[in-house]
Amino acid sequence: MSSRTVIRGGLVITASDEIHADVLIEDGRVVALAATGTQAAAAFTAGRSDLVGGPPGGWGRVVDATGKYVIPGGVDGHTHMEMPFGGTCAADTFETGTRAAAWGGTTTIVDFAVQSVGHSLREGLDAWHAKAEGNCAIDYAFHMIVSDVNQETLKEMDLLVEEGVTSFKQFMAYPGVFYSDDGQILRAMQRAAGNGGLIMMHAENGIAIDVLVEQALARGETDPRYHGEVRKALLEAEATHRAIKLAQVAGAPLYVVHVSAAEALAELARARDDGLNVFGETCPQYLFLSTDNLAEPDFEGAKYVCSTPLRPREHQAALWRGLRTNDLQVVSTDHCPFCFTGQKELGRGDFSRIPNGMPGVENRMDLLHQAVVDGHLTRRRWIEIACATPARMFGLYPKKGTIAPGADADVVVYDPHAEQVISADTHHMNVDYSAYEGRRVTGRVETVLSRGEVVVDRRTFTGRAGHGMYTPRSTCQYLDR
């Protein structure tokens, strides 16, 4: 039996257009848009397929979106479900994390499979498939963290690109864990230049940071705020500059993750002005939070420990400007939640032992809509940085990231006028605090469809673990070829 849905009467917003239209869905895909109030739209809703060439028998479910936005499901290109780190593991499983993502209007995540040192890429990827398969409420894909560059690893990169894992993350931080030196980075970049892969870079000078950590602890500076003070903005900028130059030598594209500092953004902007295929991502925590949060008393600052770290508030203006000028192309979450009780508390008396990561997969779309309300972004730019560009950057477009004939029916009915207060009491992430506790925002997800199936129905979760499908990706569609 075919499944058919019409979403009627809303303002359809994509990265390129805003139009009052009815969205017509059949068997999990968008099949047409019909301008609201036209004979075609009325005929579809009435089931008059003889008038408009619609499916026999007309449309089944009718979703009333009058007065609401109809937007593509969000694409979060940076999550870490069930991620081992710092002697513990991220609190969200693929089941709880993808359910929370759906509640927040995100219908696709790209998570990071991890290669452990001494093991193959394939082992890491298989382990992440095993964690995710049958457990996800929304569709998912994988990047590959490359922790151990060698001749076998480089050959595996080619194979992974062929099967739809087309991006590889490396770390200039975390010596002894994920760290790659410049020679390893260059070799991986050269390989990506040949196979079409995209290198994603955590750009911080981890060797220098470790010296500063050791010196701070020796001085008795152990509170969470020192996490931000030792991970200096200049060391993010230096690493960003170095990654850009290595990519330029290799002739490879570069995507710098979680850009937090104005100085690092300036390096990206300069490279882009020079015509290089260099791209940048930031995250809501850098746009809405600051070192003031890291300095909260009674160890509360530990809730905000992530890397790159939160910066002084004055960096935010540069990041918003970068999003408007397209020197930053994507807002992802870097969702990697650790509970305050029993996990973040591992770092009491030593900030370097606080697990690095924050929750946010449920909050991204709402926080960025608040940025629209506040005048930082236009509505179309909101959709561009949260849906369309991540889909293009990671080879998922136009299957994901837009509302157009042929696209997957990942569609959100969004109430732009509803007010809500973000709180751990009401969120659905498997973590005991909210990074945005008590923040009032305007705008709220009302109904969510994933491949045409309603997974959130007027603020009631109707989805299920196992609905989400693994989605192989093509190579980056955002490149200047």
Image (cartoon, grey):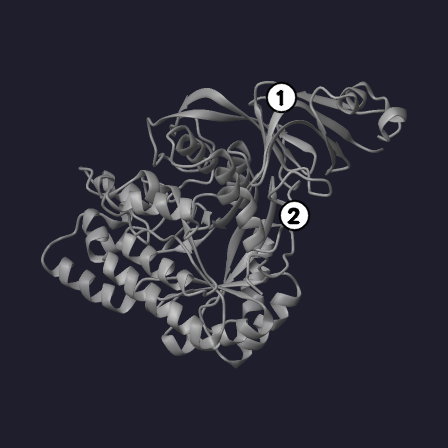
User: Quick one: 427 or 53, which is closer to the camera?
Assistant: 53
Expressed as whole percent of the image width and height from the top left, the position of residue 441 reads 39, 26
Vertical placement of 423 versus 282: above or below? above
Q: CA distance from mark 1 to mark 2?
A: 23 Å
Q: Which residue is mark 1?
A: 65
Q: Give the quadrant of the C terminus.
A: bottom right
* Residue 9 falls in image quadrant: top right
Confirm whether residue 109 shows in the render: no
Q: Is there CB contact under 8 Å for labels 1 and 2?
A: no
User: Quick one: 96 or 174, which is closer to the camera?
Assistant: 174
Q: Residue furthest bottom?
A: 151
* Residue 242 falls in image quadrant: bottom left
Q: In the image, what residue occupies the spot 74% across and 34% down?
A: 32
Vertical placement of 233 versus 162: above or below? above
Say left or right for 23 vs 328.
Answer: right
Vertical placement of 420 versus 378: above or below? above
> What is the tally of numbered marks visible in this picture?
2
Q: Secondary structure at mark 2?
A: loop
Q: In the image, what residue occupies the spot 43% across and 32% down?
A: 372
Q: Which residue is mark 2?
A: 398
Q: Residue furthest left?
A: 219
* Residue 420 falls in image quadrant: top left
Q: Callout 1, which amino acid?
A: Ala
Q: Give the quadrant of the N terminus.
A: top right
Expressed as whole percent of the image width and height from the top left, the position of residue 411 reads 62, 34
Q: Callout 2, which amino acid?
A: Pro
